[in-house]
Amino acid sequence: MRPQNCENYIYEEIMASNGYPDVAPVSNKQSKKNSPPCESGNSMPWFGMDIGGTLTKLVYFEPKYITKDEADAEVETLKNIRQYLTKNSAYGKTGHRDAHLQMDDVCIRGRRGTLHFIRFPTSEMGNFLALAKAKGMATLVTTVCATGGGAYKFEENFNQEVNLSLAKFDELDSLIRGMLYIDATNPHECYYWSEPTDESKCQKVPYDFSKPYPFLLVNIGSGVSILAVQGPNDYRRISGTSLGGGTFLGLCCLLTGCNSFEEAIELATSGDSTRVDKLVKDIYGGDYSRFGLPGDLVASSLNDVCSFGQMNSKDRRNTVSREDLARATLVTITNNIGSITRMCALNEKIERVVFVGNFLRVNPISMKLLASAMDYWSKGTLKALFLEHEGYFGAVGCLLQFTGNSNQR
Amino acid sequence: MAQVSNEETSSHPQSIKLPAAIEIFANLKNAQKFAIDIGLSLTKIAYYSTVRYRKALYKGVDSQSNEDFPAENSYQVSEGNRLHFVKFETRHIESCLDFVKENLVNVERFQGTSIQVTGGGAYKYKKLLQDKLGTEVDKKDEICCLIKGCNFLLKNIPGEAFEYERHANPEYKFHKASPNIFPYLLVNIGSGVSILKVESEQEFERVGGTATGGGTFWGLGSLLTQAKGFDELLQLAEKGDHRNIDMLVKDIYGGDYSSQGLSGDLIASSFGKAVFNSQDPSGNKNYSEADIVRSLLFLISNDIGQIASLYASMHNMNKVYFGGYFLRNHPLSMHSISYAIKYWTKGQVKPLFLRHEGYLGAIGAFLYGAQPESEKGSWLENFAGSSGLKSNTRSAQLGIQIDQLEIDQAENAVAFCPLLIDPATYNPDTTDLSQDKEARDYWLNCFEESVDKFIARAIYSQPQSPTAKDRASKLKEKYISRLHYLHEQPFGYGTLTVRTLLDTIEHCMKEFDFPDPYLLQKKQENEEALKHLKKRLEVIDNLEGSEKIEELIKGVLTGNIFDWGAQEVALLMETTNFLFEDAQKKIPERPWLQDCLDNWIKRLQEEPPHRCAAVFIDNSGVDIILGILPFVRDLLQRGTKVILCANSMPALNDVTYPELQVILKDAAKVCDIIKYALNENRLMAMETAQAGPCLDLSRLNLDLCVAMIKQNVDLIVIEGMGRTLHTNLYARVKCECLKLAVVKNRWLAKRLGGDMYAVICKYERELSKTDNQNMAKTKDICDCNQLKKNTNDSSAQVPTSTSTVMSKTIYLS
């Protein structure tokens, strides 16, 4: 029971890790001394990397016009890289370029060009580094801009294996910068789902997000961060939850044996969560009217389901499909994010919520659920907004900071 | 990790073997009223029953009884009411109902009556209930029942609510009963989670909830592991390491995410590692089922903690109680929820758990069906019949695990003593034994050693009963097993104190039908002491001024030595002809261990007399008659009214209220002052509603409280170890207070820095309004500075005042 018992001391630390540290979330303003000064933004190629817990997002800027000097100077290596990235849409087994998200003719630091959006699992970082080495990255640049936890975790690997140093940027700073930039640049970036509860009428509707503040930014990656944003440089991380995209995928892998996010979403699309969850009617046999409950209690109980509530029964377990399980997992995680978000919005008195992060990729089920959760519980006062480039804002913000603020860092 | 897990399991036994002396479904045959809460996994049956017990009749000296032993007619059969709750797994519901049916007397009397039923299984088992018991089923709303039950427990059961902090000392921090329990948030974690805001007995609403609850843990756990059932899942979680499944901040960052103040050990993504693990091409799993369940447990409980925090801040609540089957007082879940709440609210919200959380619904359902009179009086947890935390009993009759709670109804309504400075922070007990291992070990051993004495006395008190020996040996078995349980689980019945240990003896005595083992003893001693009263009064009347006051105080102290509860003194009284004069010689020279006598003398001599004194008395015989009565008589002579306050129920050789009435009547024959004061109501006897040798000022007889206000009590005198040392040493009242006791326990005396028979004579002045604010928090503000040199280790303590030393010693002890 005493600290001198080392085992127990460690144990307490471990225990603490299931919750959260005592340190209160701090404002981001004075906490950016973690990046080394960047070299001039002139050296090509321009990359922004966001190395998350599950996915690494890579944004590549391809200049439209190359000056004559540059063309002369463009060494074979750089040409190779450009062609490798822009001509392919898949890299190895797991790397992908989201061609539909590609943004042509954007202006970054006075240069016009195309933004390419590429992602690969963070677990493939070793292969990525090998590739970067093989392509001779280090002969072109000495520094790559990176954000996300992996910028810290893999810094050594970049140094040692490819001889590249990382200019590290805070992921939440980058997220907001990237998001504001893309929204300002892409006229159809922001949208909402109209009539999210009615599958036949539900559709994407563009939303004018030119006057954004204040808004809540909910970033659903492996985990979830919730930020209250009051201005371009004024935000606070007010909450978060460890039940995020990683939880959905992790549970789905365990429950269904699926092998990718896409597969998990596909399974969920054809599944039925009511065969997995417990509904109020399962408990009361649909007989609430004769129950003599006060009306408001009935109303609230009717929405009260228990996720996976039927699965303690062996018989029921034998009758559910993988699809049902995937759907139930998706619904559980999404609803939980929805209800935490809703309460944060209420506590902060903020009415617009922007959901981003790769959990929403190819995932209209979750978006519609989030939209209807905001609608239903707030009686229409809360608005759920979505952005086309869901998961790439951190990488974009990182790229922007590299070119824009290189001398400040 | 493995080592820790072992330690975890060993300190958390699943059940403790209890002797057959424990009765299952006790007092069933007279059961009056049933209510049932049928949960998905556990069912709780509540019933109200009359308990017949013998109550000792005290006859005065003028009665004709000359027998050596009290005959059977010295007792009258009395009926008390008791609420019984039995908890068992729902899958045994049928056999339990059969058992109930078989054991009920005149089961037909339930025809046409109704039984209150609540819980998720109310619908499913409706027909079974109707068939088995032949009663109508009256379904009650779960939420209403929960809240009613929660309010009942918080109001009536001391130490019901607790904070939990794993590996802290103590791990369990029990909350005292509070005069105002509202408002609070109740988070009921059943299959799903309901969050209820409770503002008063009538005003409450369901403000929210989440579908991720106990059923999610159970359902997902069943899908992901081979574990059978909820409890197996919990056991599995104890052995796991969530870090193999969860993605921590350091898995992403390689360390802390310091700009956001997120430590590397935080879970960034629950189950985030399961993605990679299940894709591991080599087919090696880096995790076990136990890891999965632990991660799942953290996922659910962290999430509930976070959501509860959000609701708490939304509704501005600082107390959140957690109940429902998910918790079952499981340390890991409580820890995790507590941690989440404290983290998310930055410590602004207190996460609280309930010892009897499983019974909320059943209690509520019962109260809904109960007659109004069953809400009268007051309630007290019966330590003899109730299971402790985490101690299941295996029923010999039914062969299943059950858990029980028994709550006695007392005739007297109780209230907080109106003169307490701050009722909300009042804590009767001086030492928390669950925190203080040295004291705990001492007292548990001490009580175990003296149990034979209690037993012998119990048997001796019923010489004509053929069953006395058998009952006494069962009593002994039960009490000793209880002491052993408390060695293991000091928090099993709330805060462990000398008071609760003493109360447990009394509950066991009553349980095994030894209502008043000292009855005869007390009577004989009272009669004997009365013979010396006249002489004693003469001695005192020959003195004057400060000498007289000092002699009166010394008389009270001398009398207080005559205590059958004190082992060493009991031996003296048993083996020698121990007289008042002998006891006088035991009182040490002044200055005493705590010596405010001079201030008391000064007060009496220099200021106007008190309006009214409430005197809380201790032992029978010499104590009350030769110690207290002369002291009281002096107060009366000064013009002060006196309320003598005696126990309502017997405890050791303490004076009970009926006995006090007889004593006063007899004393009036010896002393005119007492006689006239009685006639003129300047001397009153009242009962305290207490049933043990200690004094809990938060549960004082309501009538006495009213009288204290009406009579403008401006002096409280508390006498004896149980009432001034084990309890109330630091209690602060608004008026003057005199606390008198002789420390008749060598170990305790030493611990306090004195010797055997050390004297506590503590006199506290009334507090002015400003004092009230400043001083209410200080432990001890007795204004005397006299110091008895500490003979044992004076070098170790160089005190500035006795009071600080004492308060420190006892507080730390």
Image (cartoon, rainbow, N blue to C red):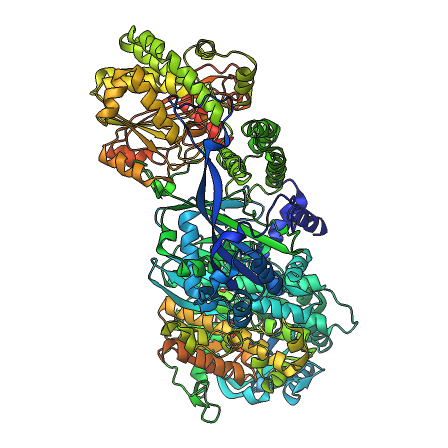
| Residue at 34%, 11% in the rendered image | B534
Most distant residue in the bottom direction:
A200
Can you give x and y, in whole percent of width and height, for residue B263 in the image? 56, 57
Q: Residue B318 falls in which quadrant of the image?
A: bottom left
Most distant residue in the front direction:
B64
Figure check: A203 above or below B477: below
Most distant residue in the top direction:
B542
Figure check: B605 above or below B335: above
User: Can residue A33 be seen in the rendering of this structure?
Assistant: no
Can you give x and y, in whole percent of width and height, for residue B27 in the image? 53, 49
- In this image, B744 relative to B700: left or right? right
Q: Residue A354 falls in which quadrant of the image?
A: bottom left
Figure check: B485 above or below B592: below
Could you say which is closer to the camera, residue B281 or residue A326? A326
Can you give x and y, in whole percent of width and height, for residue B56 in the image? 45, 33
Could you say which is closer to the camera, residue A223 or residue B345? B345
User: Can residue B448 be seen in the rendering of this structure?
Assistant: yes
Could you say which is closer to the camera, residue A242 or residue B189? B189
Can you give x and y, in whole percent of width and height, for residue A271 in the image? 60, 84
| Residue at 64%, 49% in the rendered image | B12
Q: Residue A119 falls in which quadrant of the image?
A: bottom right
